[in-house]
């Protein structure tokens, strides 16, 4: 891999390896000289101790992070500078955010990681490729989150050689792509020798809110008086009190505010006002060429570009006066302002015409191939009216940003291109592109604004259809009512000029909304139209639209029609992976598992985190349905943090519902309720009744296991009533109904139980699915009088024994054994209770295990205390244990889970301690003995395997 630097970065950042003065160690450009920083540290001893504690923890092998938050001039940079000086024997990585560079994707990450590029061959290949593409070292299209994983791997690889200190100054001006990669990496630092320190202005970088904070407030009066003694311009004793009051504890004001100005400004002036006035006086003293030269520097930090632009404008000594006045200095090829306030002040107070002239000159001064994007932004800043040539340049900039994973930068470039487009249709097209990239970047609110702006310009019916789908999709993400979205889709479908691709997209959205709302009849109304449009659409939308039509047929009771379509689509692994619950309703578990395995493998190979999170959320529900609780928990444990990272609360909710189900089986009350709350909130926001009911089913199952049938009824009854009022006739959509029937039966509400069983049996026998028929038979056994219960329970056992439903079988065995024991048939009860006891013990379903044990003891059988091999492991630990059992190394596990090898080692150490073992071989033996193998037979409704 070639790690030489591309031209666009060479002149932006000084050589990190060159010897530098102590005040700017490791090549970072300090905003203040070291002696100024030392003065600023008066009264900051406790705050400095907080920073140094984080550094010391890294030396001891415990990673940590701290973000210093404070207003301009309060001393954030000085604290970071002092921490750098004290970080002896640590490898220092530094980056400083610059406002004018925030549109260049991964520019800050390149500054930070430049000293570590030699380590790229040491990290997982997929991550190295993603990083190399993001940093413009190689061609490629990186996944932004794979870049984050690569950043983490580089930190850890460097820390293997020496503890690492990462310093991020003015982090609120780091480019967004770099921020996302850094957040991903810092969140996953656990046992590594890495410390991260950052400085931000209040409220400007919410992405860093997860880090511990150090709020940097004003200095106290005593410390302020001490700092006054360090001023180059003494303050007369008679003015000290007024001066201290005027500074309001801001160290930079104390050092910079002229005495005369302190006397003139009103008491109500803020420290920011005083800073601006203090530096304004120096700016006013500059000659015209010096003021314009400083404007060039405020718009562009590259000294060479500023020098060229100044020469074009025939400015004499453009930066000398400002440097003499202490407003800025040049470090290598980089211009560093005395303070960010100076840069902002220079630019904000310049006339609009001067700014346009400066930007045009700077664009001309950046003729290199590697400077195209910066030049395009300068031309855009200079433009005062629509300009197609500049809009086209910005569109090209967006394409390059997208290719490097810089979705935010691409969205901004396309937005500005849309604003500069003379033609309405071009403007609408570019704003649509900006909306899509903003949405992919996780900024749904901005994406919605851009889509609505584009819709106001769009005349082309095809583009309008695309925009309406975009607006509706974003609205669903934000919890907009399905009625509003559906109205938009239906109105758009009235256009006679739509092609089949757009028709498929719009009808797909309508059908999906109706299915989510349990409106099977409404979904069925549009299913034939969706099927026809799908046949003429492109492969991506066509296959998904066809599957959506099949889902409508399935939920509305046309199972054979649905089966034909789903069987056609099963050869495309993406479709079962996208529609896992429909394939589960058909009981095509082998097909679904195969598709999930294949697409998960692809997602891991390409670093596609959205695909991984989606697949693992589906896998979590598949394994839960089949009673493989460890596998379900492991899949959910991967999906949930990935979903959080990529900003998809819907996926987090889906996976959380499955994990809540695992906790429910195991009687883990708080984890179950917490996961269910997360899942319910996500489902409610999108109007998805199915996912909402699954989350509530976990709470009901927890209640049933704990002997509280009344709570189970309270939780499930509202959803059962919604189902009763709906047109849904597919039992797989309402899997909670048998639990409701059992809860009523336990609560002695026989009439209610019978009513729901009659309703559910009608759709179960129509569908013919093994699960539905078996649960109906079990419920009949619960309610049957006399000796009739035997026939029903035996029918349930007959169906379940040749199915993959391990825990459903155990529930029937438990219920049958309980009934037999109550009827005085203790000998007949024991085999069923013993089998249930063993099945529940195998998956650590503690409440059900204890219930079976109690019944067995009541039959006169002695029961030893049972313990499952892996009950105390967290889902993350369990996931790692399963991968160890597959023979993967720590590095391979780390790469697949987007963690560091040390984090994997940390979790393994906890696992060894909990299980009282000392080797991977011992762990493998336990996992293999515990693993719940999937059934080799996949049962369809009529008892046959699905025909591929």
Image: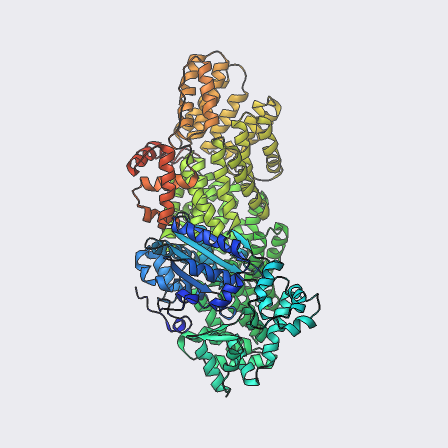
For image coordinates 55% across by 29% down, the residue present is 703
Q: Position of residue 836 (x, y in %)?
A: 42, 24
Answer with the quarter of the image where residue 707 lies: top right
476 sits left or right of 599 in the view: right
568 sits left or right of 745 in the view: left
Q: Position of residue 469 (x, y in %)?
A: 56, 58
- Picture layout, residue 161 above or below residue 796: below
Counting labels gives 0
- Picture layout, residue 55 above or below residue 429: above
- Picture layout, residue 581 above or below residue 895: above
Q: How is the image coloured?
A: rainbow
235 or 626, which is in the foreground? 235
689 or 327, which is in the foreground? 327
Q: Position of residue 910 (x, y in %)?
A: 38, 38
Q: Dividing the image into 4 quarters, which one contains the N terminus?
A: bottom left
For image coordinates 45% across by 15% down, the residue present is 857
Q: Dividing the image into 4 quarters, which one contains the C terminus?
A: top left
């Amino acid at each position: 891999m070639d790690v030489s630097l591309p031209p666009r970065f060479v002149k932006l950042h000084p050589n990190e390896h060159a010897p530098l003065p102590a005040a700017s160690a490791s090549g970072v450009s300090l905003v203040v000289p070291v002696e100024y920083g030392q003065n600023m540290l008066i009264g900051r001893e406790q705050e400095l101790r907080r920073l140094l504690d984080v550094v010391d923890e890294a030396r001891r092998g415990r990673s940590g992070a701290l973000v210093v938050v404070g207003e301009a001039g309060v001393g954030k940079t000085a604290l970071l500078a002092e921490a750098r000086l004290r970080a002896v024997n640590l490898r220092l990585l530094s980056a400083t955010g610059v406002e004018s560079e925030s549109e260049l994707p991964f520019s800050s990450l390149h500054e930070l990681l430049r000293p570590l590029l030699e380590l790229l061959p040491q990290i997982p290949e997929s991550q190295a490729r993603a990083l190399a593409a993001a940093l413009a070292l190689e061609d490629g299209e990186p996944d932004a989150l794979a870049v984050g994983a690569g950043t983490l791997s580089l930190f850890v690889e460097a820390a293997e050689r020496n503890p690492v200190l990462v310093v991020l100054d003015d982090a609120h001006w780091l480019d967004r792509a770099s921020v996302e990669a850094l957040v991903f990496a810092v969140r996953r630092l656990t046992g590594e020798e890495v410390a991260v320190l950052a400085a931000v202005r209040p409220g400007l970088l919410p992405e860093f809110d997860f880090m511990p904070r150090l709020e940097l407030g004003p200095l106290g009066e005593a410390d302020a008086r001490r700092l006054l003694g360090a001023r180059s311009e003494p303050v007369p004793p008679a003015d000290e009190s007024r001066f201290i009051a005027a500074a309001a504890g801001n160290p930079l004001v104390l050092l910079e505010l002229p005495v005369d100005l302190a006397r003139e400004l009103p008491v109500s002036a803020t420290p920011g006002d005083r800073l601006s006035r203090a530096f304004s006086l120096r700016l006013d003293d500059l000659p015209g060429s010096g003021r314009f030269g400083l404007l060039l520097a405020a718009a562009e930090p590259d000294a060479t570009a500023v020098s060229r632009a100044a020469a074009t404008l025939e400015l004499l000594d453009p930066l000398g006066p400002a440097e003499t006045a202490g407003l800025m200095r040049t470090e290598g090829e980089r211009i560093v302002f005395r303070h960010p306030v100076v840069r902002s002040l220079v630019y904000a107070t310049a006339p609009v015409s001067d700014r346009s002239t400066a930007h045009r000159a700077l664009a001309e001064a950046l003729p290199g191939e590697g400077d195209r994007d910066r030049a395009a932004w300068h031309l855009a800043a200079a433009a005062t009216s629509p300009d197609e040539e500049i809009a086209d340049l910005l569109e090209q900039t967006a394409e390059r940003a997208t290719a490097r994973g810089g979705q935010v930068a691409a969205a901004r470039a396309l937005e500005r291109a849309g604003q500069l487009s003379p033609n309405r249709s071009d403007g609408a097209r570019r704003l649509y592109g900006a909306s899509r990239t903003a949405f992919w970047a996780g900024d749904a609110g901005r994406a919605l604004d851009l889509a609505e702006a584009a819709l106001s310009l769009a005349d082309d019916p095809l583009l309008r259809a695309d925009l309406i789908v975009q607006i509706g999709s974003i609205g669903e993400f934000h919890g907009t009512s399905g009625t509003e979205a559906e109205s938009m889709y239906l109105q758009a479908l009235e256009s006679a000029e739509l092609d089949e691709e757009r028709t498929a997209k719009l009808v797909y959205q309508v059908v999906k909304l109706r299915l989510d709302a349990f409106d099977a009849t409404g979904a069925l109304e549009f299913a034939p139209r969706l099927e026809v449009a799908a046949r003429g659409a492109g492969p991506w939308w066509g296959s998904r639209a066809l599957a959506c039509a099949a889902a409508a047929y399935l939920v509305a009771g046309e199972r054979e029609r649905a089966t034909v379509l789903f069987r056609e689509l099963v050869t495309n692994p993406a479709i079962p992976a996208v529609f896992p619950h429909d394939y589960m309703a058909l009981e095509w578990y082998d097909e679904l598992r195969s598709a999930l395995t294949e697409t998960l493998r692809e997602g891991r190979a390409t670093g596609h985190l959205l695909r991984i999170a989606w697949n693992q959320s589906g896998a979590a529900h598949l394994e839960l349905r089949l009673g493989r609780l460890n596998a379900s928990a492991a899949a959910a444990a991967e999906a949930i943090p990935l979903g959080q990272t990529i900003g998809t609360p819907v996926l987090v909710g889906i996976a959380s519902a499955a994990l809540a189900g695992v906790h429910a089986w195991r009687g883990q009350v708080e984890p179950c309720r917490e996961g269910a709350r997360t899942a319910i909130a996500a489902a409610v926001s999108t109007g998805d009744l199915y996912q909402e009911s699954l989350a509530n089913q976990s709470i009901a199952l927890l209640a049933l296991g704990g002997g509280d049938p009344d709570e189970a009824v309270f939780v499930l009854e509202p959803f059962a009533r919604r189902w009763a009022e709906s047109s849904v006739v597919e039992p797989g959509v309402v899997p909670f109904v048998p639990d409701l029937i059992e809860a009523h039966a336990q609560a002695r509400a026989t009439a209610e139980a019978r009513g729901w069983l009659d309703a559910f049996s009608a759709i179960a026998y129509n569908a013919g699915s093994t699960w539905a028929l078996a649960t109906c038979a079990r419920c009949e056994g619960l309610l049957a009088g006399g000796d009739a219960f035997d026939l029903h329970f035996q029918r349930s056992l007959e169906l379940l024994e040749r199915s993959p439903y391990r825990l459903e079988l155990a529930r029937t065995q438990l219920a049958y054994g309980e009934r037999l024991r109550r009827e005085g048939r203790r000998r007949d009860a024991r085999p069923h209770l013993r089998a249930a006891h063993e099945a529940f013990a195998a998956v650590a379903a503690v409440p059900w295990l204890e219930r079976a044990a109690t019944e067995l003891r009541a039959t006169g059988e002695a029961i030893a205390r049972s313990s499952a091999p892996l009950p105390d492991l967290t889902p993350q630990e369990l996931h790692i244990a399963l991968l160890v059992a597959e023979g993967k190394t720590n590095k391979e596990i780390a790469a697949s889970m987007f963690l560091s090898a040390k984090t994997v080692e940390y979790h393994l150490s906890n696992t060894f301690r909990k299980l009282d073992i000392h080797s991977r071989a011992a762990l493998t033996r336990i996992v293999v003995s515990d693993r719940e193998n999937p059934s080799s037979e996949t049962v369809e409704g009529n008892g046959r395997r699905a025909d591929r």
